[in-house]
Image: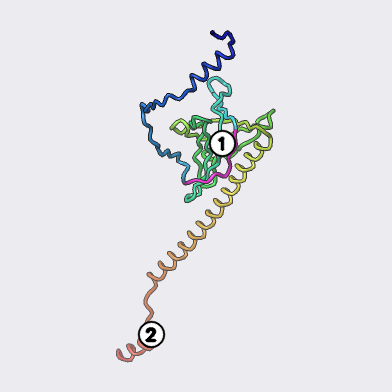
């Protein structure tokens, strides 16, 4: 006698679906593990925060979203150079890549008067100009980045400003060292020049002996 209970029929159907038939299905495609290089292997992260990035479209005169993901300040272990790098979440596509000089990421190739600053009307955001390489070519861009909290925004700005200050101090020291070295080289060159042009000194005894011989 057939059962009219729908719950029992569903249980029986589910049991049939879960029943192990013992059949083995070989995979159609075998995937091998591939090592992926990101270019960050020789760098240490000074900062790593989640944020949303915007780029200012000059033609449309409006902000356009560039991507959401993790923004990092990376310092190279050997050269000491710092850059700002941001990748989109999941796809890991680069949406910002500022190649900086030694300890000077965001402010590289930017007018001295332009600095990173808070976005007007939003204390979770800040704006800056930079020569960006995210699209494979160096372009002047204006960026705005928005964080999930005021604390993260301040942390980002303070870290960038601290790196810029360290860069200025290092550049001043390098300039002073170069000037000192140049001064020493100039003094050495002048001393060598005078030594080459100075006449040979003749002992007084030899001069007297020559005079007596002539007499």
Q: Nearer the viewer, residue 5 or 154?
A: 5
Secondary structure of the residue carrying tag 2 is loop
Would residue 124 be found to the left or right of residue 15 on screen?
Answer: right
The residue positioned 60% from the left and 42% from the top of the image is: 160
Q: How many marks?
A: 2
* Relative to 196, residue 6 above or below: above
Which tag is nearer the camera, tag 2 or tag 1? 1
The residue positioned 55% from the left and 13% from the top of the image is: 9
Q: Position of residue 21 (x, y in %)?
A: 42, 24
Regarding residue 158, the answer to whether it shows in the image is yes
Residue bounds of the magenta highlight: 42-50
Q: Are marks 2 and 1 in contact (CB under 8 Å)?
A: no
Residue for badge 2: 203
The main secondary structure of the magenta stretch is: strand
**Quadrant hosting residue 8:** top right
The residue positioned 51% from the left and 42% from the top of the image is: 100
Secondary structure of the residue carrying tag 1 is strand
From the image, which quarter does the C terminus lie in? bottom left
Q: Nearer the viewer, residue 79 or 168?
A: 79
Q: Which mark is residue 71?
A: 1
Regarding residue 139, the answer to whether it shows in the image is no
Give whichever of discs 2 and 1 has the lower sequence position. Answer: 1
Q: Nearer the viewer, residue 51 or 102?
A: 51
In space, the residues marked 2 and 1 are separated at their CA atoms by 78 Å
Q: Residue furthest front?
A: 1
**Label 2, residues with CA under 10 Å away: few <14, some 14-19, many ≥20:** few
**Quadrant hosting residue 196:** bottom left
Q: Position of residue 74 (x, y in %)?
A: 53, 43
């Amino acid at each position: 006698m057939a059962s009219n209970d729908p719950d029992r029929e569903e249980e029986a159907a589910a049991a049939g679906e879960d029943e192990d038939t013992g059949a083995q299905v070989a995979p159609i495609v075998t995937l091998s593990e591939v090592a992926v290089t990101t270019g960050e292997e020789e760098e240490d992260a000074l900062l790593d925060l989640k944020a949303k990035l915007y780029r200012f479209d000059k033609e449309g005169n409006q902000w356009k979203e560039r991507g959401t993901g993790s923004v990092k300040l990376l310092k190279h272990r050997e050269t000491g150079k710092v850059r700002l790098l941001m990748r989109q979440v999941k796809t890991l596509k680069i949406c910002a890549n500022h190649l900086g000089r030694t300890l000077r990421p965001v402010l590289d190739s930017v007018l001295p008067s332009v600095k990173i600053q808070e976005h007007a009307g939003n204390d979770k955001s800040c704006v800056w100009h930079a020569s960006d390489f995210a699209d494979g070519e160096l372009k002047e861009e204006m960026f705005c980045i928005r964080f999930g909290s005021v604390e993260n925004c301040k942390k980002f700005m303070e870290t960038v400003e601290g790196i810029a200050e360290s860069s200025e101090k290092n550049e001043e020291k390098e300039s002073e060292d170069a000037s000192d070295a140049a001064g020493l080289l100039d003094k050495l060159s002048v001393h060598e020049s005078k030594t080459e042009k100075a006449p040979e000194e003749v002992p007084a005894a030899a001069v007297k002996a020559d005079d007596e011989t002539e007499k």
